[in-house]
Amino acid sequence: MSGVRPGYVRPLDIRHGRVDLSHGAGGRAMAQLVEQVFAAAFDNEWLAQRNDQALLPRPEGRIVMSTDCHVVSPLFFPGGDIGCLSVHGTINDVAMSGARPLWLSAGFILEEGFPLAELQRIVDSMAGAARAAGVPIVTGDTKVVEAGKGDGVFITTTGVGVVPPGLSISGDRARPGDRVIVSGTIGDHGMAVMSQRESLAFGTDLVSDTAALHGLVAAMVEAVPELHALRDPTRGGLATTLNEIASQSGVGMTIDEGAIPVERQVEAACEFLGLDPLYVANEGKLVAIVPAAHADRLLAAMRAHPLGRRSALIGEVTEDAHRFVQMRTRFGGRRIVDWLAGDQLPRIC
Amino acid sequence: MKYIDEFRDGDLALRIAAAIAAETDSARSYNLMEFCGGHTHAISRYGVTDLLPPAVRMIHGPGCPVCVLPIGRIDLAIRLALEQKAIVATYGDCLRVPASDNLSLLKAKAHGGDVRMVYSPADALKIAQAQPQREVVFLAIGFETTTPPTALVIKEAARLGATNFSVLCNHVLTPAAITNILESPEVRRLGTLPLDGFIGPAHVSTVIGSRPYEFFAEEYGKPVVIAGFEPLDVMQAILMLVRQINDGRAEVENEFTRAVTRDGNLKAQALVSEVFELRRSFEWRGLGAVPYSALRIRAAYGAFDAERRFGLETRSVADNKACECGAILRGVKHPRDCKVFGTVCTPESPIGSCMVSSEGACAAYYSYGRFREIPIAAGVPA
């Protein structure tokens, strides 16, 4: 007779194992991966139901929903990884309506051969971020693609939240005379990631600013419910976000180069790579458009929050049929701050 | 940032601007060409023209490396990637330059070509060493600034005995382009391109020195002031040019003394002449065939010359008819004179090369300056 206990399942070898096609095939191997990695880390009452869907109570108020796909190279970077990034990114997209995020879903596309140890690290980081934010991951899915058809791991998260009554925050509400506020230094995330890219690795102690901003937003809407617009300047950077709002609202903007907070290291790295920090990605910053009369109150509330300590008033909304974002340069001239064209590519000379 | 902010000081800029305004004679005009794309970029990015009196007119020159690269040469690189299945490595700026058949290197990549962006030719050689079974071609472009690193990597490839690495050389020469502009009918016969002086290149001059420009001052009577790429450098150079023009002088002056000497970098020059030789003629976008204006790899290093290695023949391809890049690169036209500027031709989908690099006159003007031409309308459209 065998000495193995009946019903014994050999646990996944997280340390040395790799994702294989059976982990996405719907059989026992997949169930084991889900149990041992995802469910164990995300652990909450909705996942514990073990259904294909989460059964949720109906929240009071207007519901917002947002989804975000995450692909990042490298997967691990100073200050974070694709796991916490995928939680913060969607929480932030939900929060930019002024909403309180309630639940998240997570979809994983794993590449055959991806080390389970790295997957575990990513999932732990997601679980930690979700727990810290108080926003549980209540449902999810996993697929595995053949080696060479993915880039390790892609994560899609969807978030649902509820907007407190009395708020009307939208990208089309910027009005001439409004003030433009940014919640801190720009370009930290993009430069931290770039510093780790194989082709140009450069020495720096820059870390990504990846963070969930719903706490900051809650403090802001409590202080100034009259807020007009909020947006997090992720891909395309501050410049692109301002252009999006200007175009959505049918207004122009004028910003002051000297007022925009930029970390010295970011400025230096941009300088030698020929990049412009205005176009570099952020993952833990937001732009607020607020009526001039409330700007000081908002700024004070933001600076009182740990994620908004370096908030700064950077410009104002103007009347402009061409919807240009203009900048007064530190040098004393004026120029357009345009949409990002294509990818930001380094210059030669 | 230490050592950078000093050259971007707004208060100092206003003082120089006041000096320029005080010293210009409003009865005449000062038509100054900045040769380099680096200057074009600085002027646009910092809004330098806002600080200049109306009498001073800046004309963008042809010194943008990707802008002057003709379509036929990009086609060669695309063919290497798509037909020869070579890994083509190049600088980021080159990837979006429009070529034949609606392709660019970036689009060739989407069609399955292995195109890599590198920061230095040395990175291309590293790729070749890491993948010895693949042919790796470095698409080398640029003026005298980027030539020494290419020379160095070719020598290094020779030392390592690399058998799968070559360079598609498109290095061009600044003085030849300046001569071409000064000899152009617009300057010499027609007088449609008034030119009163040049802002001389910054980084190029660190390599070739200030001596090569003395010819332009002596022979053509045009003042030249070599300037750094920071906005205060440009302002100071404009002031120095205004003074020369007022005094009727035509000299080579050096504003960029912190980096440029009269003789330049002799070691780099020796390296370049060891590896490269002059081409009899080379096609420039905008300028056409310019004699003795470019370099090719010497026979001694022929094994690393992609043109020899793959038996490449450059076909000359005409620019899009509506595109005014040619005239813009010669300084004859301004981006706003081009019918497709800002409509069909934008940085997202460039028709001409001047719209590609942020150093290109069109892209710089589109991205930073076009609001000047558009009156700010009152009222917000519904």
Image: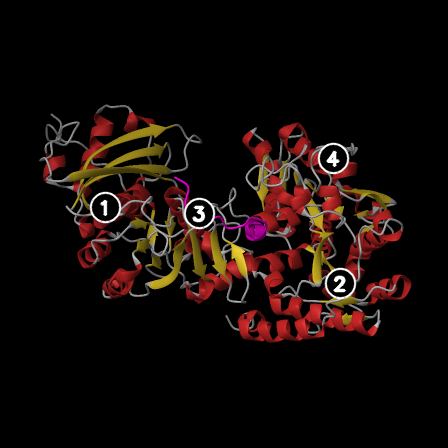
Residue matched to label 1: A168
Asked if marks 1 and 4 fall on the same chain, the answer is: no
Judging from the image, what secondary structure is the residue with disc 1 in? loop
Chain at numbered mark 3: A
- Check disc 2: other Cα within 10 Å, few if <14, some if 14-19, many if 20+: some
Image-quadrant location for residue B68 = top right
Query: On the picture, is A189 further left or further right than A57?
Result: right
Q: Earlier in the sequence, mark 1 or mark 3?
A: 1
Residue matched to label 4: B72
Closer-to-camera residue (A101/B90)? A101
Chain at numbered mark 1: A
Q: Residue at x 74, y 61 (%)?
A: B32
Q: Where B249 sits versus B134, above or below?
A: below
Residue matched to label 2: B29
* Amino acid residing under circle 4: Gly
- Check disc 4: other Cα within 10 Å, few if <14, some if 14-19, many if 20+: some
- Check disc 1: other Cα within 10 Å, few if <14, some if 14-19, many if 20+: some
* Amino acid residing under circle 3: Gly
- Is any part of residue A320 visible from this angle? yes
Marks 4, 2: nearer the viewer: 2
Part of the protein shown in magenta: B367-382
Marks 1, 3: nearer the viewer: 1
Asked if marks 2 and 3 fall on the same chain, the answer is: no
| Residue A149 location (% of width, % of height) | 43, 30
- Check disc 3: other Cα within 10 Å, few if <14, some if 14-19, many if 20+: many
Chain at numbered mark 4: B
Q: CA distance from mark 1 to mark 3?
A: 25 Å
